[in-house]
Amino acid sequence: MDLGIQGRWALVCAASKGLGKGCARALVQEGVNVVITARGEEALQRTAEELRALAPPGVQVLAVAGDIATAEGRAAALAACPQVDILVNNAGGPPPGDFRDWDREAWIRALDANMLTPIELMKAVVDPMMARGWGRVVNITSAAVKAPIDILGLSNGARSGLTGFVAGLSRKTVARGVTINNLLPGPFDTDRIRQTLQGAAAKSGRPVEEIAEERRTQNPAGRFGTADEFGAACAFLCSVHAGFITGQNLLMDGGAYPGTF
Ligand SMILES: NC(=O)c1ccc[n+]([C@@H]2O[C@H](COP(=O)([O-])OP(=O)(O)OC[C@H]3O[C@@H](n4cnc5c(N)ncnc54)[C@H](OP(=O)(O)O)[C@@H]3O)[C@@H](O)[C@H]2O)c1
């Protein structure tokens, strides 16, 4: 299927690794020019080289190092992108813990990264997208929005706030060709999940691979998802074929969420 987005420009935030990188890879393969961001310059430049190697002729890959959760990081990312036709919002997830230990600063950090940053970026791009009559926004959130994980209270809270905001805005933009949707990852094989598994291993004294295998077999799919699968879903939501899909929360969890809907 031709996704019909060749030549568009995408800003893919937090994309040197993991799910963001999967989204950037899928878009580049569709002929989309991308600006990718991450804080760590070395991994970011390595990823940019990888993307250039698989990009069709003429497709540009630009890398902007910076913290997307800061005003400066967002300004640099936006300035590098000649025109944001596609915005993929992403940032690292907040740390796990007990809500009794989280002070106001911890909450503000989580809200900044996982709620206010995507809202600020939408604020910057949605009106120009509507003026041009076309745009796509995909927010990477979490399965925790649908089925909260107790130790990830910062994530449950911040991402639910973003989800509520998107539910309202996405109905105001669609008539002008701009859709806004959220992708909710369950367990995906990325650095983030490896860190979580290492934490669980350290806490329980069990080998990390044993815990990973347990998590994989507990999932109805019997495995973790891949960044390529995630990227393909993102690219479809960014395609010309997805113009009637807006305000949705697409859960990608191998069937782990047990509800009928
Ligand atoms: N993987 C899963 O199973 C899973 C499940 C549910 C939710 N999620 C959520 O999905 C998102 C992506 O997860 P992932 O698994 O892809 O993580 P990952 O493999 O750790 O990759 C995170 C990427 O984001 C970049 N990044 C993090 N914070 C950033 C910031 N403030 N500004 C710019 N770049 C930043 C990282 O690079 P630098 O560190 O160099 O900045 C890296 O490129 C996270 O919010 C995560 O919580 C993941």
Image: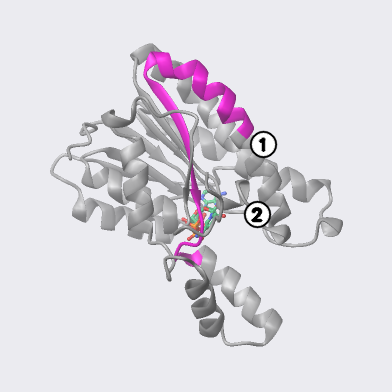
From the image, tell me which residue sits under label 2: 94
Q: CA distance from mark 2 to mark 1?
A: 14 Å
Is residue 17 at least partly visible in the picture? no
Name of the residue lying farthest toward the left? 57
> Which residue is at 43% across, 19% downward?
174
Q: Is residue 216 left or right of residue 55?
A: right
Q: Amino acid at mark 1?
A: Gly
Earlier sequence position, callout 2 versus callout 1: 2
> Which residue is at 31% across, 48% downward?
232
From the image, tell me which residue sits under label 1: 161
Q: Amino acid at mark 2?
A: Pro
> Which residue is at 36% across, 37% downward?
237
- Point out the stretch of residues depicted in magenta: 164-191
SS under mark 2:
loop
Residue 212 % position (x, y): 52, 77
Residue 138 % position (x, y): 44, 37
> Which residue is at 17% across, 37% downward?
2
